[in-house]
Amino acid sequence: MKKLSVLLMCSTAVLLADSWSGTLVDVLCKGKDVAGHTRQCALACAKGGYGVVLADGKFVKLDEQGNAMALAKLKSASKDKDLKAKVSGKLDGDIIAVELIELLP
């Protein structure tokens, strides 16, 4: 019963989270051509952290947990450019407290 309660609480937290869709990019390259930004560059610049460039050009940075999730997703991705992603979490100031990252096809 305890496991079910924990599962329901986690599921509810994700359902209540906000989400952002855009291009996943490292902080150092956020102002460059994000559609042409490569996975290899994002991996090489991992120490600077990651964020999402939204359709309006706004850049929203990921928190430490989100950076770790983004790095793992990038390492396992097969796509090399135009790294579209959906990020779920809560906005804390100008940083997303990430709960989930999904790379889009």
Image (cartoon, rainbow, N blue to C red):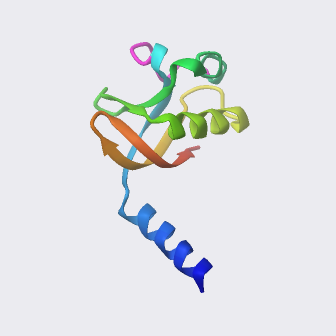
Residue drawn at x 38%, y 40% as measured from the top left: 96
Most common SS among magenta residues? loop
Location of the C terminus by quadrant is top right
Q: Is residue 41 magenta?
A: no
For the point 35% across and 49% down, which residue is it? 90
Q: With respect to residue 67, does 104 lie above or below?
A: below
Image location (x, y in percent) of residue 38: 60, 20
Choose between 99 and 75: the one closer to the eye. 99
Is residue 31 located in the magenta-colored stretch of the structure? yes
How many numbered badges does the structure rendering display? 0
x and y, in percent, of residue 45 in the image: 59, 16
Q: As rendered, which of 103 and 91 lies closer to the eye?
A: 91
Q: Position of residue 66 (x, y in %)?
A: 51, 39
Look at the image and tell me in which quarter the N terminus lies: bottom right
Q: Residue at x 49, y 28 (%)?
A: 50
Residue sitting nearer the eye, 42 or 61: 61
Lateral position of residue 59 relative to residue 82, left or right: left
**Residue 101 percent coordinates (x, y):** 53, 46
Residue 77 visible in this rendered orientation of the protein: yes
Residue at 64% of width from left, 39% of height from top? 73
**In the picture shown, does residue 8 fall above or below 26?**
below
Q: In the rendered image of this protein, does residue 27 appear above or below residue 91? A: above
Instruction: Residue lying at the far front in this picture: please name it.
Output: 2
Residue 40: which quarter of the image?
top right
Residue 41 location, quadrant: top right
| Residue interval drawn in magenta | 30-38
Q: Residue furthest bottom?
A: 1
Q: Is residue 37 visible?
A: no
